[in-house]
Image (tube, helix red, strand yellow):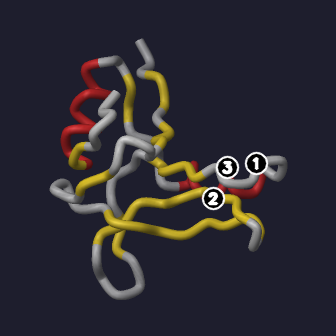
């Protein structure tokens, strides 16, 4: 919960407080390959340590579906990048 949005850093901090961990980067590709029945209009952000995109900027993976098909791509991944409250992030439960 951040109905008014938050920075990536705040989202990750709250998830940590809730017992959630960041995903390994390969979760993005594995989810895209296996989630073939993703509903149209669903956009998932993979909570992960940022990786360098082609242009060198930090990014996180997105697993999306829209009228154009199924997509795996990247978007902003700096700690101070703002995300709206509509964004949904995928985390993994912490192992005890």
**Quadrant that contains the C terminus:** top left
Q: Is residue 67 above or below residue 18?
A: below
Residue for badge 3: 31
Asked if the residues shown at circle 2 and circle 1 are in contact, with their CB atoms under 8 angstroms apart, the answer is: yes
Q: Nearer the viewer, mark 2 or mark 3?
A: 2
Indicate left or right for 80 with 8 as reference.
left
In the rendered view, tell whether residue 95 sits above or below residue 75: above
Q: CA distance from mark 2 to mark 1?
A: 8 Å
Residue 80 in picture, x, y percent from top left = 16, 56
Quarter-of-image position of residue 12? top left
Residue 23 percent across, percent down from the top left = 46, 42
Residue pictured at 35% horizontal, 18% vertical: 19
Q: CA distance from mark 3 to mark 1?
A: 10 Å
Marked residue nearer the N-terminal end (2 or 3) = 3
Which disc, if any, is residue 38? Answer: 1
Residue located at (34% from left, 49% from top): 84
Distance, label 2 to label 3, CA atoms, is 10 Å
Q: Which tag, 2 or 1, sits closer to the chain's start?
A: 1
Position of 85 with respect to 25 (left or right) is: left
Q: Earlier in the sequence, mark 3 or mark 1?
A: 3
Query: Few, some or many C-alpha atoms within 10 Å of disc 3 (few <14, some 14-19, many ≥20)?
Result: some
Label of residue 64 in the image:
2
Identity of the residue furthest to the left in this view = 80
């Amino acid at each position: 919960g951040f109905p008014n949005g938050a920075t990536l850093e705040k989202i990750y901090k709250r998830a940590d407080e809730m017992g959630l961990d960041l995903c390994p980067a390969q979760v993005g590709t594995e989810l895209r390959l296996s989630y073939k029945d993703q509903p149209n209009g669903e956009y998932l952000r993979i909570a992960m340590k940022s990786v360098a995109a082609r242009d060198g900027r930090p990014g996180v993976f997105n697993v999306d579906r829209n009228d154009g098909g199924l997509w795996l791509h990247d978007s902003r991944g700096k700690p101070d990048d703002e995300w709206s409250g509509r964004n949904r992030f995928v985390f993994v439960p912490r192992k005890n």
